[in-house]
Amino acid sequence: MSTATPLLGPELLARLEKMELVSRKIFRGRMKGERRSRRKGQSVEFADFRNYVPGDDLRFIDWNTYARLDRLFLKMFLEEEDLHFYALVDASESMDFGNPTKLDYAKQLAAALGFVGLVRGDRVKIETLGQPPGRSPVFRGRRGLWPMLDHVGGFAPGETTPLAQGVKNFCLRNSGKGIVVLMSDLMDKAGFEGALRYLVAQEMDVYVVHVLSAEELEPDLQGDLRLVDCEDADVAEVTVSAALMARYKRTLAGFIESARDFCTRRGMAYLLAKNEIPLETLITDYLARRGLVR
Amino acid sequence: MGLSWINMLSWWQWAILAAVPPAIVVLYFLKLKRRPVEVPSTYLWLRSIEDLHVNSIWQRLRKNLLLFLQLLLVALLIVALTSPGWRGQRLSGDRFIFLVDNSASMTADDVEPSRLDEAKRRAVQLIEAMQSGDAAMVISFADAARIEQDFTGNRRLLTRAVEGIQPTNRSTALGDALKMAAALANPGRSAYDITDTQVAEALPATIYLLSDGKFPDVTGFSLGNLTPVYVPIGEAKPANVGIVAFTIRALESRPEALQAFARLENFGADEVRVEAVLRHDGKLLNATTLELPGGQARGVAFDLGTINAGALALEIRPDDALAVDNTAWVAVNPPRQAEVLLITPGNRPLELGLSTEGAAKLAKLTVQPPSYLKTKAYATAADAGRYDLVIYDRCAPETMPQANTWFLGVVPPGGEWKAEATVDVPKIIDIDLAHPIMQWIALDDVILYEGTPLAPPPGGSVLVDSKMGPMLVVAPRQGFEDMVQGFLLVEDVDDQTYIRTTWPIRPSFPVFLFNLLAYFGGGPEVLAQGSLRPGQPVMLETQDPKKGLSVVAPDGKTSLLEQSRPGKYNFTDTDKLGVYEVRTGGKLQERFTVNLFDPAESDLAPRASFDVGPVEVAGQTGWEDVRRELWRWLVLAGLGVLLVEWYIYGHRVSL
């Protein structure tokens, strides 16, 4: 369910402009960026010399040293690189709940983070779990803002790819390093653990934003109900009593705790995002505290 | 005792009922329409309830627990509708007469708390088992029957009537109660005139006789439309020792000294060691212990010495099943001054002898000439029994008075007494020293100048015998005794008085007169009044009717009596055992006692059967308590199930 309101308001954009994405690791990018990378390359910052081996780019031979020592050395520079920022949005049917819907919330968050990346010259790629095979657009630079917003705005609920499959596909498509932010409600009957393991193997700086709606946290249900799962039409007949509600709350807390625990143990940052929290607060406060933005 | 059911529904009602459980099952499987709600994911919900599925069998059971509870509830209600109950006494017919025995033996506590209470309990149970439309009546009976409640269908009234039956100390007779019961079932008259609507229709009734059967067989009675059901109450052979007799009497040798006799009987089967304690006005007087073999009786005697007045109570221990026969009373009344009338033309020795200090204590002497016999005052006094002893000296009345008499020189009228020809100097050869009148008398030095040998009526005993024949004879007469003396003390001839015997100047003469007054005048010999049976009426007298007469019962209740005849009072309220005090003008006049003294009541073993006319009525061998209904408990259990179901419904977390 897409909203008529723009994904990002002007005030928010103004605030986001001053921020930047922070990676806890130094990654190699494909293009020069504004970040120092460990990779020696073409830049102004000298790093080291090494012996010339045939095939090296002749342009980096230090001719002055050759004149003095009659030996060929290659000058090596620290290369400044761009950051790969991936946002992975779960656009399954279950995300289409809440006010604003969890999907809208995730899309806004993805767009906002993407905008921060664009402003800083990072390489921004926003995908959904059900992304069809083939390349997805990559956005770079301020001018990429509108295409990106268009792209994100086009995400519609109803994808049926399971969480694990979607993450796996993403990992296969994007083998590089970078920051990946997974936005999902993690409610997959097969469990979220398998999906997150793919991300661990990817050696990316992983952020898991667990988006939950108020309806899930505080369900306003009562009586004899036939709960229909909007994704697989699975039916659970329950009689919602105080006892069952208490049980549900315990299960929910356990679920959140298990996700947080799983992520923390594997070096992933976990953030529970309720759709009631304003996006600005989420980014400037919660995510800043987690160290994703600065 | 087993369960039984009463079918209260017709087949189509059963059919409807039988359709209820399948309907519940069907409805359960159709289930209530749940409101469908679309949720993002049932993931958390399923996980919330998934650990409830761990034990699938239990879970399945639990899943259907509400169904089972509903079925259980319906089952309980259906069972309740069959009116189950513990099989018990069934009442047949629609008219019942409950005869409850409240005689003395029913106070026995061989069944807790007492036989009467047990009988009442069973009667109430029977009343409760009555169906609506049944009518019953309650009669209590001992030696007489009493309708406690006339025919009614009101069970509350009947129960209250039964509860109100009080124990009595009376003996038992069934005939009276049966006659009352039969009055309705067997109406005495028949209708010949079609317009006679008042005639009673013969209504068959069932008699429930709750008794221990200690009554004689009923003869000359036909049960007719009555169906007797005899419910024997009491244990087969309860241990009981009872006092069946208790009396006092003067010693033969010393009339002023009293002896108490009691007869104890052991009605049980085992030998019992009995302690008998005798008290005089509450003070311990004597005690003894004796062994009583089962089924045997034994007498026990106590020497009392000189007791002038008071009440003796004999108590036996240990307490046994029947308490009312463990204590017996006897009253010793103070010697009353005898009223003696001497009718004589003049007899100085006799008048002197009767006026001695000792004699004056015993008797009040009135002397009248023979002409007094003709007066109306004499006739009234003689008929009313005003005097204890009338002495006729050389004169005789026309009819015998209501008193003891002593005739000197004449024989009583009526022809029963015969006198022979006068003989000279009859030599005294024998005197009856065993007779109270002749105690401590020696007549060896007595000379009779002349005498008339006597021929007494049958039953007379000769006190003084002479060579010529009996000279002093005493004979009974309808509760009185007449003493006739064949010789004279003095004789008047031509205005001269002659002594006819030397007796008056001998020491034996005043002793004889003293014995005489004591014997005829209400001395110690007649102190012990006969005991009354409970409920037996008693006729009381007073010398002074103006002062009125009141009786203080053993429980302290004082009743002022109404005169029935001049100087005579009827007292009927003798139900309590113990000593009754008769007071006149606030002063104790005499005492009398009421004792059970009924071996039939003391023998507690209930009778197995008895005869009513030619019919033998056998007791029910086993008593079954009246049917106890279970449906209330079933409905209560159903309510409990309903509560549990509601609780589970409110707290279940499962599907």
Image (cartoon, rainbow, N blue to C red):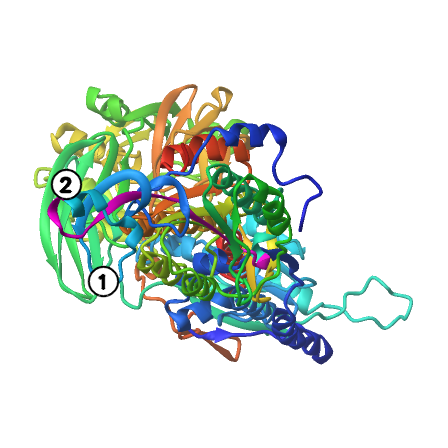
Crowd band around label 2 with a 10 angstrom C-alpha radius: few (<14), some (14–19), many (20+) = many
**Residue at point 40%, 36% (across, down):** B395
In the rendered image, residue B267, in percent from the top left (x then y), is placed at 24, 62
In the rendered image, residue A87, in percent from the top left (x then y), is placed at 48, 50
**Residue at point 55%, 43% (across, down):** A111
Between A120 and B552, which is closer to the camera in this rendering? Answer: A120
Seen in the image, is A238 located left or right of residue B551? right
In the rendered image, residue B10, in percent from the top left (x then y), is placed at 71, 77
Crowd band around label 1 with a 10 angstrom C-alpha radius: few (<14), some (14–19), many (20+) = few
Residue found at the far right of this picture: B195
Seen in the image, is B201 located left or right of residue A124? right
Task: Please say whether residue B412 is visible from this viewpoint.
Answer: yes
What residue is pinned by disc 1? Answer: A54
Marked residue chain, label 2: B
**CA separation, marks 1 and 2?**
178 Å
| Discs 1 and 2 carry the same chain letter | no
Task: Please say whether residue B325 is visible from this viewpoint.
Answer: no
Per the image, label 1 sits on a secondary structure element best described as loop
**Residue at point 16%, 35% (across, down):** B256
Numbered mark located on residue B439 in the image: 2
In the rendered image, residue A135, in percent from the top left (x then y), is placed at 52, 62
> Which of the 4 image quadrants contains residue B295?
bottom left
Residue type of the residue flagged with mark 2: Gln
Residue type of the residue flagged with mark 1: Pro
Between B343 and B318, which is closer to the camera in this rendering? Answer: B318
Seen in the image, is B557 located left or right of residue B476? right
Between B124 and B463, which is closer to the camera in this rendering? Answer: B124
Q: Is residue B227 above or below residue B404?
A: below
> Which of the 4 image quadrants contains residue B364?
top left
> Which of the 4 image quadrants contains residue A105?
top right
> Magenta span covers which residues?
A68-93
Q: Work out which quarter of the rendered image holds the N terminus of chain B and state it.
A: bottom left
